[in-house]
Image: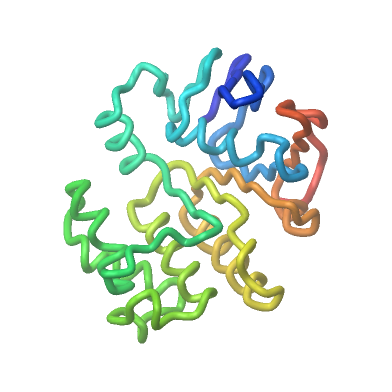
Amino acid sequence: MIHIEEVRLQLQSQAGPVDILRGINLDVTAGEAVAVLGPSGSGKSTLLMVIAGLERPSDGRVTVCGTDIQGLGEDALALFRRRHVGIVFQSFHLVAAMTALENVAVPLELSGHDNPFERARAALGQVGLVTRLEHYPTELSGGEQQRVAIARAFAPRPNLILADEPTGNLDQATGAQVIETLFSMRAETGATLLLITHDQDLAARCGRVLTMGDGLIVVPSNSAPA
């Protein structure tokens, strides 16, 4: 599902080059749920961006769903993500001018899926928002907005879900509800999950936990309940 080999990312700053990722090696098999822990600045979110094809590494190899994504142009990468990858961001990334239904349906429509609005309604129903279809993001709570984002990520039935601190902007109770939604949808679809988090209790819900520090995976894995 994911194969990363000696991936490095170096960015330029006013003080000179900065090594963000310093030789990452990682394999994730289909159907796994893998959490990545680590402090801010350790490279967790950058690793997710590289796997999603939203950031190109300086060196190394990234293969996702059997495709060497570094060989894809921007248009091909966008199409690849629409077909194979769902992303849940900390800050929701909903389109303010679109209703909840449109936020989920329009990406499906652009990707050529059949019956995009029917699929969007079904996905929003699965996350408990059947009565909020016509509400705009500003009319939804933070937890509801994140559930819309989860519905949008899962609606195309992707092979891989990437979640970057999905409860980072939510209070504890709301975050717990969102996580239940995320793991319920993942169990139903069988999608592979890579979860970026600071929360050790949340990470323990995954089948494998990695820890990053200073641009490297410093703890390869441990056993945790799936």
Q: Residue at x 71, y 28 (%)?
A: 215
Residue 59 % position (x, y): 54, 13
The furthest residue to the front: 14
Residue 33 or residue 4, whichever sits in front:
4
**Vertical arrangement, residue 78 with respect to residue 201, above or below:** above
Side (left or right) of 169 relative to 53: right
Q: Quadrant of residue 95?
A: bottom left
**Vertical arrangement, residue 167 with respect to residue 129, above or below:** above
The furthest residue to the bottom: 131
Residue 40 % position (x, y): 72, 45
Q: Residue at x 71, y 45 (%)?
A: 207
Residue 76 or residue 130, whichever sits in front:
76
Q: Residue at x 63, y 19 (%)?
A: 16
Residue 169 % position (x, y): 61, 66
Q: Quadrant of residue 119?
A: bottom left
Q: Residue at x 33, y 68 (%)?
A: 96
Residue 150 or residue 28, whichever sits in front:
150
Residue 136 % position (x, y): 33, 77
**Vertical arrangement, residue 25 with respect to residue 220, above or below:** above
